[in-house]
Amino acid sequence: MCIAMQEEFWQIINDLLQVSLGDIIKDAIASDPDRSKFGFIPYMAKTYLGRLLAESFCERMISIANIVMSEYYMLALGSMHAWSNVYH
């Protein structure tokens, strides 16, 4: 691929990354109220997009909880060792 084509390719990719997928799906649903053009595809895409966002949020929360619990465990373990040294 020549340099001009590579630059054009990355410009297209950059332009597509700025597009809001939610707006495209809303427009597709609004432009086809009787589902004669797209059928249920926009509705399925909307549901799939919502699921991905919720799944991503849950994964982030689980990751944060793991970090917090690991730090808490290390602090608790350290304090348990400190107390065990006092009694031995």
Image (cartoon, grey):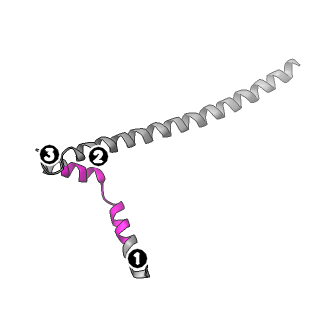
Dot 2 or dot 3: first in sequence order is 3
Amino acid type at image mark 3: Arg
Q: Quadrant where the C terminus lies?
A: top right
Q: In this view, which residue lies farthest toward the top?
A: 87
Q: Write the start and end of the magenta stretch as one range.
A: 11-28
User: Is 80 displayed left or right of 59 in the figure?
Assistant: right
Dot 3 or dot 1: first in sequence order is 1
Q: Nearer the viewer, residue 10 or 80?
A: 10
Dot 2 or dot 1: first in sequence order is 1
Q: Quadrant where the N terminus lies?
A: bottom left
Judge the density around disc 2: few (<14), some (14-19), many (≥20) Cα neighbours within 10 Å: some
C-alpha distance separating marks 2 and 3: 14 Å
C-alpha distance separating marks 2 and 1: 30 Å
Residue for badge 3: 35
Q: Relative to 30, does residue 7 appear above or below in the rendering? A: below
| Residue 84 among those drawn in magenta | no
Q: Relative to 69, does residue 35 appear above or below in the rendering? A: below
Residue for badge 2: 45
Amino acid type at image mark 2: Ala
